[in-house]
Image (cartoon, rainbow, N blue to C red):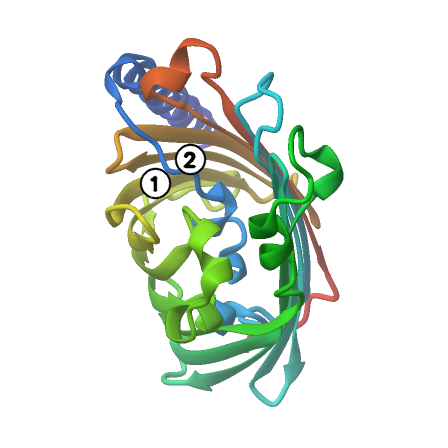
Amino acid sequence: MLIRNNISNKRNDRLFRLLAAGWIVIILFCGNYAHAQLTNIQSIYFQNQYLANPALAGIEKQLNLNLDYHQQWIGVPGSPTLTTFTADFNSGNKVGLGLNIYGDNAGLIGRTRVMGTYAYHIPLSDKGAKLSLGLSIGFSDAHINESGIVGDQGDLAVSQFNSHGVYADGDIGVAYTSPKFNAQFSIPNLKRAFFQSQADAVDVEASTFYAAMSYKIQLTYAANYSIYSIEPKIAYRGVMGYSDVFDVGFNLYRTTFEEKYQLNLQGVYHSDNSISWGFGIDYHTLGLLFTYTYNTGQLSSYANNTFELGLSLKLLKKATL
């Protein structure tokens, strides 16, 4: 019996390495033929879905802390950088609470968002299915760094933009979740969606909606060693000033019970002809995710790299809802 398990585990290891190698080959092949890319935080697909949908705050009965750093076009002066921090937990009585802090800098323009989230999770079955509703309310601020301007620092357009100051903002979302199936829809940036102003004119690549579905498939069964599973996912998102983007990807992961860690291999193809891949590990309560996106088009000749690093910490875990 032990010999059979060892043979099975070796086959599973080979399968994991083969799929990983195959995906890397696809990335290297397709990356040369892509033509345009709209960047997006890769953590929203699998590691930290609360970033994209307030309904998923507190979906698990534990405290989740997530920090994410996204760097685009390395080596280009003023290249965009994005940093996010989220904290969410289930306070009991089907209520989830969260905090979402977002900082974005691109050239002279800086943006900050701070959102508090309330989510309500309605059990639909004794097998873990839930319907979740979420609302985030907070404030946003966008400004131009006048000290960095080379030229006329008294430009009226700059002062008019900065005069908008801090404004109220919010996100809203709904999600259906079960141990295997996940479907969700959210509308971020409610102010921009319903109360557009002159300040919104520079908000390129701003998300107008996000919809996604995924399904978890267990590939192998090994009760005393590890399990291989895959979660295919499709997503559709609106982007201000551009065509909508369709995403299709997967998260292939290996869960090891004895050592209590999980390995993740992720890949996402975006309909703007860009491809992202990532590798992560969850060890006990700590998680690490690294992703790389192939920038394409004319910029690829001198700025063909966008990377993202995500850290997660899971604390105070309780029994499943």
Quick one: quadrant of the C terminus? Answer: bottom right
- Name the residue at 49% across, 44% down: 41
Residue 168 lies, in percent from the top left, at 60, 75
Between 132 and 209, the one lying in front of the other is 209
Q: Is residue 268 left or right of residue 259?
A: left
How crowded pointer 2 is (Cα within 10 Å; few <14, some 14-19, many 20+) is rated as: many
Tell me where residue 116 sits by quadrant: bottom right
- The three-letter code of the residue at mark 2 reads Gln
Mark 2 = which residue? 266
Between 73 and 319, the one lying in front of the other is 73
- Name the secondary structure under disc 1: strand
- The three-letter code of the residue at mark 1 reads Phe
Q: Is residue 268 above or below residue 115?
A: above
Residue 43 lies, in percent from the top left, at 51, 46
Q: Is residue 229 left or right of residue 85?
A: left
Q: Is residue 289 above or below residue 160?
A: above
Res 201 label: none
Mark 1 = which residue? 250
Between 255 and 143, the one lying in front of the other is 143
The answer to whether residue 319 of the structure is visible from this angle is: no
Q: Do the residues labelled 2 and 1 touch (CB within 8 Å)?
A: yes
The answer to whether residue 304 of the structure is visible from this angle is: yes
- Name the residue at 45% across, 25% down: 3
